[in-house]
Image (cartoon, grey):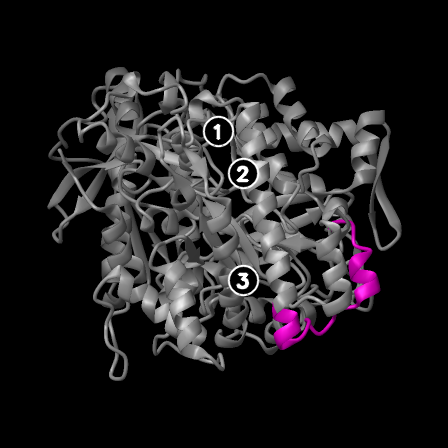
Amino acid sequence: MATYNISEDIWQRKYRYQGSDTIPPDGSLEETMQRVARAAAANEPESERWRKEFAGILTTLEFIPGGRIVANAGTAREEVTMFNCYVMNRIDDSIEGIFETVKESALTQKQGGGVGFDFSTIRPRGSQIKGCEAEASGPISFMQVLDSTCRTIMSAGQRRGAQMGILRCDHPDIEAFIKAKRENSQLQMFNLSVAVTDKFIAAVKANADWDLVFDGVAYKTIRARELWDRIMRSTYDYAEPGFILIDRINHFNNLYYCENICATNPCGEQPLPPYGACLLGSVNLTRFVRNPFQPEAAFDFERLAEVVPVAVRLLDNVIELSNYPLEAQRQEAKKKRRMGIGVTGLADALIFLGIKYGTPESTAMVEKIMSAITRAAYRASVELAKEKGAFELFDAGKYLAGNFVKTLPQDIRDAIGKYGIRNSHLTSIAPTGTISLLAGNVSSGLEPVFAFKYTRRIRNGAETDVSEVEVLDYAYRKYCECRGGKTIELADLPDYFVSADRISPEEHVEIQAALQKYADSSISKTINIPADYPFDKFADIYLLAYEKGLKGCTTFRPSEHLTGVLIRPEDNRKKDAAADPGLAGKRPDELPGTTYKIKTPMSPDAFYITINDQFENGCLRPYELFINTRNLQHFSWIVAISRLISAVFRHEPKPFFLVEELKSVYDPNGGYFKNGKYVPSLAAEIGLVIEQHLNSIGLAEEKKSKKKAAPAALPEGQDKLKMICPHCNERAVIYQEDCMKCLACGYSRCN
């Protein structure tokens, strides 16, 4: 099996600029970084000096800006943003306010920005709307509108939309919010998190009552521990909702005096005020280890202190360089000049140093590294303030009284008091999925290495022309090179080569806490949990995260509730065929069937749906579906959906899940009413027809008595943490940095 250059592949597919009439194409990754350096230095009085300085940290990959910057800086693309994510405006509790948010989020996503929302300002479902004698539909109904909007924007562009939905733990609809995504297939464009308050944690510990309140009115009182257990059980089984400690976020916010934070960006590393934006970049820690794998291996803190100030200046210049989807976002960015410098390659750097991830020695080292980055960044921002001025909303007395700023060394605090500071916030640890691949497949962000080598499938043009290549972790590859280029078996590696499946949840928390101490914003990290981890211990992880000072916590535990986690689809088909061999057999020459007519306002021509059945083991089961209409505009999707549904029929004797999936499809242009019932889309009506047919052939009663299957046995070791990819069908999907990524084909839920 051949190895391949994953850095080259990612550069070609995501970051290489193909050129325009006025700007030449990138000829190499170095030319891409030179393009970014030129753009970032363009407005500097000493532009050539700073172009060289910026190129000096970019071409060496010591510092890698966020992907939007690498892809767009210095190109002819005018309507793109270089900020990865935003938090939207405070949602006004009115139809006008809600749909203003819909419009603004669509404009933001059009330019490639992910968005976060706080839905706590929307009145709960069932409450009265003054003036029209109607009941409110609640925040979840409006989340569905934003979900459909995001799908539509995604379908028009190249990137998958990313959204974060947040609801406070005391909102009356919090119980429905916890289970919202598993009720049906809606809200799949959202990550969900509960905004947890200090008061709620205290009530949980005391097993006290907890009021669910909106606008000063208590709608319901429950036990705090009961609500806590619901959140924990949902997270244990379904990996959502996440956990954001909103009071702690505001307590340590440098701008506590002029803003209130209620939400985060989609991956959680940037708590932001309304219209806030996150400008990101990562220090590649693998480039700072001298003499890797040797007894004298050491981290070069002197070089780190040289690189970070240049990175601060580069990102500060991007604030002027970037476009913004909304004028309010531009004003917010320029008044506060927030940025988030983080890390990538942390696990590989520890391996270079011979330190095992998760040990007390590793915790001490990562704390020392993050402390050095933060202090260098704050000193650099003070120097920039001397030269270019402090950020507009800087107030020396109030800023220095901030709880995070108080932790800085006295010489930095004195300098801030004397000269001001250019940027309100400077450090944040964000996901680095593709930029870590760009740097040679270094370990991603602060995460442990998931796999030291794995197989990736590469399509070579034609759909069927696929080759398999071997991908090696950066540290593992370097270790093999320094051992004469020979492949080292994983079993023969030193014990400091530790992968994610060998790290306890508590060790994950310790590493994150060590870094959080020196990050003025927050951290995006996934704590991987073994499938057999006891629930009682699982809930304690979140309390440990609270006690250790984290601002949020995200876990992932493989579960039978998550599609494709435990069993490959072909394994299910084999089991079904063994239990009912006629299902997947050869099609009989004749099959009985029924034809249904659908007439919708979405098309001038009727649709005729024919479902043919097969008699097996004493009962009828659907075998295939055909759709016919005179309107050829729909021909391609009719063929596609007919074949897909027929395939499900032949391999699933009880296709009730298909009905629910189809019924939950919402057309972004709106649905229609039929026989007094709202139908959200044509696909949903096809689902209703299938449901009607299942009733008519006697399968409906089986749906009511359907029992949940027992959890299947998971493979041993590393595969315990992998899922089946919906794109390539390999057990190669991992969950890191709040995102699902496939090691085999490169599929990502987030982009």
Q: Is residue 350 above or below residue 283?
A: above
User: Where residue 617 is drawn, which disc sits there?
Assistant: none
Secondary structure at badge 2 equals helix
Which residue is identified by label 3?
Answer: 312
Mark 2–mark 1 Cα distance, whole angstroms, equals 9 Å
Residue 44 versus residue 619: which sits nearer the camera?
44
- Residue in the image at 46% along x and 32% along y: 562
Q: Position of residue 746 (x, y in %)?
A: 30, 45
Q: Which mark is first along the chain, 2 or 3?
A: 2
| Residue 40 x/y as whole percent | 44, 72
The disc, 2 or 1, on the residue closer to the chain's N-terminal end is 2
Q: Is residue 460 left or right of residue 427?
A: left
Q: Amino acid at mark 2?
A: Arg
Instruction: Tell whether position 16 is magenta.
Output: no
In the structure shown, which secondary structural element does the residue marked by tag 1 occupy? loop
Residue 744 falls in which quadrant of the image? top left
Any part of residue 535 in sight: yes
Secondary structure under badge 3? helix
The amino acid type of the residue labelled 3 equals: Val
Quadrant of the frame with the N terminus:
top left
The residue where tag 1 is placed is: 561
Work out whether residue 183 can be spotted. Answer: no
Name the residue: 54% across, 18% down. Answer: 533
Residue 686 in the image, given as x and y percentages of width and height: 38, 50
Q: Which residue is mark 2?
A: 182
Per the model, the C-alpha gap separating discs 3 and 1 is 44 Å
**Residue segment shown in magenta:** 384-404
Q: Look at the picture and state if 75 lies above or below 436.
A: below
Task: Give the image quarter of residue 584.
Answer: top left
- Closer to the N terminus: mark 3 or mark 1? 3
Is residue 387 found inside the magenta-colored segment of the image? yes
